Image: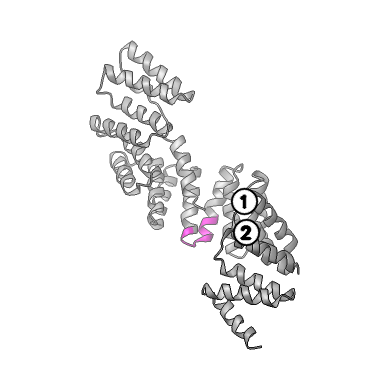
Amino acid sequence: MNTLVPYLLLLFLTQIFTLPVQAFASSSGEDAILMNAAVKFRKGDFSGAAEAYSEVLKINPGRAEAYNNRGLCKAASGDAEGAASDYSKAIGIEPALTEAYNNRGLVFAATGRHQEAIADFNQALRINAVQAEVYNNLGMSRAALGDHVGALDDFATAIALKPHYPEAFYNSGCSRQSLSDHEGALRDFLKLTALQPGYAEPFYRCGTSRAILGNHKAALLDFDRAISINGNYREAFIGRAVSRIRTGNFPGALADYDKAIALNPENPEIYYNRALVKVKLNDYAGAVADCTGALERRKNYPEALFLKGIMLGELGDRDGMLADLQRSASSGYAPAKKLLRKERNR
């Protein structure tokens, strides 16, 4: 799963929506409008708040903060282009307004324009280098472009500036997982679970890294914790199923795949993986049914065709077996080609 995007959106909602009403030194009329705008924003009336900021700008079009805050309103309403335009106007009036560079960078990042986002975050840091959130945002855009090594440097700087920064630990852990540094990732996610024990994903991430490191017993505890927090966490059920398989608990793995399919009945891989568990439990007919379910959702699924063919052979249906092996072999699946030659030479 792509884990950087949800946290990017989280940051977009939590870090930039600060309305510095006190920054304005204005007439009492303008003050009243600004206070009204801030109240509307906090109540979720983003269009009303934007209209209020527009009123201020009609009175005084040179207020950079008003453009910046109206941009926040537009961003919160989903108008990314309008938000970016307002941030640019704020920067044109006040080139040292770091908030506007950071906010525009977040809009660019949220719309996939990461190179432009990086340029804005770097400019914000040139103006003021002591901004943990901006380093974190910069790291996320680097990671989105695949530069996880560079991203780790940014997350480390963010943590140095803000030692109890959960988002930076999360993002650092994700980049370490992408670089296959699972011991480092585990350290980051464990720090995050200490800071935010009520969130399921850090425990799931711990379980994933522990499983890759071969510690499936500990991974099971992490997956259990994630599921106890979020009983509909499909990925955690799948992760726990794999660790249960590795520890020989096939009935438990079957139960987890049952739950995962109930949560997402259109994923062919889960059907195929459940079929493999049913093979271990000698439920060949059930394995055929799950392979069929996988193939209904992905017609060209050579592994499912291969397994289904073998199971049909175990059930005495040689013609069905050969037909499935042929379809799998036609897809280029080498094990199917090898077994098909062997069967035809019998």
**x, y percentage for residue 181?**
49, 61
SS at mark 1? loop
State if disc 1 and disc 2 touch (CB < 8 Å).
yes
Seen from the viewer's position, the closer of residues 167 and 111 is 111
**x, y percentage for residue 51?**
37, 21
Query: Does residue 51 sit above or below 296 in this rendering?
Result: above
Q: Which residue type does callout 2 highlight?
A: Ile
SS at mark 2? helix
How busy is the neighbourhood of tag 1: few (under 14 within 10 Å), some, or many (20 plus)? Answer: few
Name the side, left or right, on which 237 lies relative to 73: right
The residue depicted at 38 percent of the width and 24 percent of the height is 50
Magenta region includes residue 185? yes
Query: Does residue 234 sit above or below 302 in this rendering?
Result: above
Q: How many labels does the image show?
A: 2
The quarter of the image holding the C terminus is: bottom right
Q: Earlier in the sequence, mark 2 or mark 1?
A: 1
Marks 2 and 1, how far apart at CA: 9 Å
**How would you classify the magenta stretch by its main secondary structure?**
helix
**x, y percentage for residue 56?**
31, 18
- Residue 264's label in the rendered image is 1
**Residue stretch in magenta:** 178-186
- Residue 133 in view of the camera: yes
How busy is the neighbourhood of tag 2: few (under 14 within 10 Å), some, or many (20 plus)? Answer: many
The residue depicted at 35 percent of the width and 38 percent of the height is 102
- Residue 270's label in the rendered image is 2
- In the rendered image, which quarter is residue 252 located in? bottom right
Q: Which residue type does callout 1 highlight?
A: Asn
Query: Does residue 328 sit above or below 1 in this rendering?
Result: below
**x, y percentage for residue 150?**
37, 55
Seen from the viewer's position, the closer of residues 26 and 327 is 327
